[in-house]
Image (cartoon, rainbow, N blue to C red):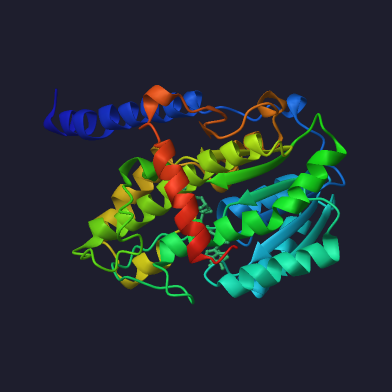
Amino acid sequence: MSFLYSIILYFIIIPAFILLVIRFTIRKLRGKVDLTNEVDVSGKTVIVTGASDGIGKVTAEEFAVRGARVILACRNLQKAERAVADIRTRTTNGEMIIMHLDLSSLSSVRKFSSEFIEKYGGGLSILVNNAGVLNAAGKRKLTEDGFEEAFGVNHLGHFLLTNLLLPELAKAGEKNLSEPSRVVIVSSLAHTWGSLNFNDLMYEKTPLEDWRMMSKLYSNSKLANNLFNLELAKRLRSGKVNVNCYALCPGIVDTNIGKEDMMNNPPPVYVTKILFPIFKWVIMKDSKEGAETTMYCSLSKYLTHQSGEMYRNCEFWDYSKRPKLSEKDATKLWEMSEKLVKLN
Ligand SMILES: NC(=O)c1ccc[n+]([C@@H]2O[C@H](COP(=O)([O-])OP(=O)(O)OC[C@H]3O[C@@H](n4cnc5c(N)ncnc54)[C@H](OP(=O)(O)O)[C@@H]3O)[C@@H](O)[C@H]2O)c1
């Protein structure tokens, strides 16, 4: 065997084959939305937060395709308009309405909710808490209300929003008892690495030494998403409210999350030009694939009688494959969040 042939075999053909097998296997394991087993959403009102980009934009499109009245709750109205214009090149179905919502501002969340109720009140069938930030810059950022940004946007903003919209969700649930309204929380596998310090939820006292701590902030906010889901389900059940809730991980999806921060502190060229494209091709989902579990949780009839559980790859996320969530922490987080957003 010539030297050149050996190099090609061992450094190109065999690695490429292994990557191909991994790519194929990963895609096999991903579930698919079962279009034949969905709740009919045509004419129904749904809200998607962060619908201007990534998974949220595809989610809004999927609802529009199914004939829903979709409220795109976005912080950047021009970007949202561009998203709608782009979606409209593919479908004329449904109704798409852009409304301003900045989850880093509690007053914006309150304004959005009251405007929604005033203009479109009468029942909200599905609320998708999708918007999210991942601070990859390594600097602690704060929201308008002084909360650590990831915790403030990903958890507290959505916590307040959901609570303010619960009467609307309940209203839609009462109209059709066999079809509970749904709250769908886009969380992440990253919650696995989270751990909440209830004495320092905003990381004011804990030093942020390096980027690992920044990813910890994201993980903590996602853990908060899952604890919120758990406690919300418990409260809805005990209040006999016909609303269910679901938390999910969309997978590793090629979107813009964290990219702006990363641009300011770019990784070495071999990462951006070689490793990342390989990783993307083998492992990552595109935004359409990334939105599939959101659509599954939003519409699948299999989930009509479930609440408070977690999902990924369009299926139940087995307890044995993730850390157990603490019910005590869920209650404590709820009570602290109520105080932080001044809910009562
Ligand atoms: N991508 C992944 O691999 C991955 C993995 C696990 C979980 N997730 C979760 O999936 C969700 C969607 O993320 P993505 O990957 O689609 O990211 P993305 O493309 O960056 O989209 C995030 C969306 O959230 C919006 N947003 C951010 N801050 C907001 C605020 N303060 N108020 C209102 N909207 C705000 C963004 O608005 P602008 O357009 O104005 O920036 C954008 O529309 C997030 O919750 C994320 O944590 C993503």
**Residue with the most extreme bottom position:** 144
| Residue at left offset 78%, top offset 58% | 88
Quadrant housing the N terminus? top left
Query: How many labels, in total?
Result: 0
x and y, in percent, of residue 201 in the image:
35, 60
Q: Is residue 256 visible?
A: no
Q: Nearer the viewer, residue 181 or 35?
A: 181
Quadrant housing the C terminus? bottom right
x and y, in percent, of residue 100 in the image:
68, 71
**Residue with the most extreme left position:** 3
Q: Nearer the viewer, residue 64 or 343?
A: 343
Q: Nearer the viewer, residue 288 or 7?
A: 288
User: Looking at the image, is 206 positioned above or below residue 127?
Assistant: below
Residue 85: quadrant of the picture? bottom right
User: Looking at the image, is 58 positioned above or below residue 146?
Assistant: above
| Residue at left offset 30%, top offset 53% | 197
Residue 298: quadrant of the picture? top right
| Residue at left offset 66%, top offset 28% | 303
User: Looking at the image, is 2 positioned above or below residue 98?
Assistant: above
Q: Is residue 284 visible?
A: yes
x and y, in percent, of residue 248 in the image:
52, 39
| Residue at left offset 45%, top offset 43% | 330
x and y, in percent, of residue 281 in the image:
42, 41
Q: Nearer the viewer, residue 29 or 298?
A: 298
Residue 218: quadrant of the picture? bottom left
